Image (cartoon, rainbow, N blue to C red):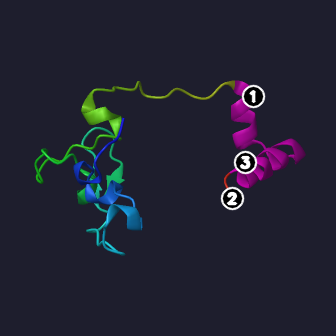
Amino acid sequence: MVISTNALPLARRPLHPIFHLPARHTLSSFTIECSFCGALHFLEERIRDSRVSDPLFEFCYHKGKVRLAIPTEPPEPLMYLFTKVDSLRMSFNNSVADSFSF
């Protein structure tokens, strides 16, 4: 399935010469809060037909269709890795940090 880049919100459009987009686009400040989860967005990420005063975001709770339960405490082994100070926890933290380094 091919999606026209014009159908995408400005913030989701690729910056690639094949799409004939300007070399740079400008986004508003990163201060628009999702009404479902509180995540911050650029206004330009909103679904095109949603109101500026009450924007909806496709990739944030799927326009409010997804409802997640309030998380409970993690299982004991994971809680241990989050809270204890020992060599196992340090190794875990280093592994996680290495996994997310780009």
Q: Residues within 10 Å of mark 2 (few under 14, many from 20)?
A: few
At label 3, which amino acid type do we have?
Val
Name which quarter of the figure residue 35 lies in.
Answer: top left
Is there any visible trace of residue 15 in the rendered image?
Answer: no
- Give the residue pinned by disc 3: 96
Farthest residue in the right direction? 87
Q: Is residue 30 magenta?
A: no
Choose between 61 and 8: the one closer to the eye.
8
Residue 95, percent from left and from top: 78, 48
Q: Which residues are magenta?
A: 76-99
Q: Secondary structure at mark 1?
A: helix
At label 1, which amino acid type do we have?
Pro
Mark 2 vs mark 1: give the one in front. Answer: 2
First in sequence: mark 2 vs mark 1: 1
**Principal secondary structure, stretch drawn in magenta:** helix
- Give the residue pinned by disc 2: 101
Give residue 48's mark.
none
Q: Residue at x 25, y 35 (%)?
A: 63
Q: Is residue 85 magenta?
A: yes
Residue 56, percent from left and from top: 21, 43
At label 2, which amino acid type do we have?
Ser
Judge whether 40 appears above or below 16 on screen: above
Q: Residue at x 31, y 33 (%)?
A: 62
Q: What is the CA distance from the residue labelled 2 to the residue labelled 3? A: 9 Å
Disc 2 and disc 3 in contact, CB within 8 angstroms: no
Residue 67, percent from left and from top: 34, 26
Q: Is residue 45 left or right of residue 49?
A: right
Q: Secondary structure at mark 2?
A: loop
Q: Secondary structure at mark 3?
A: helix
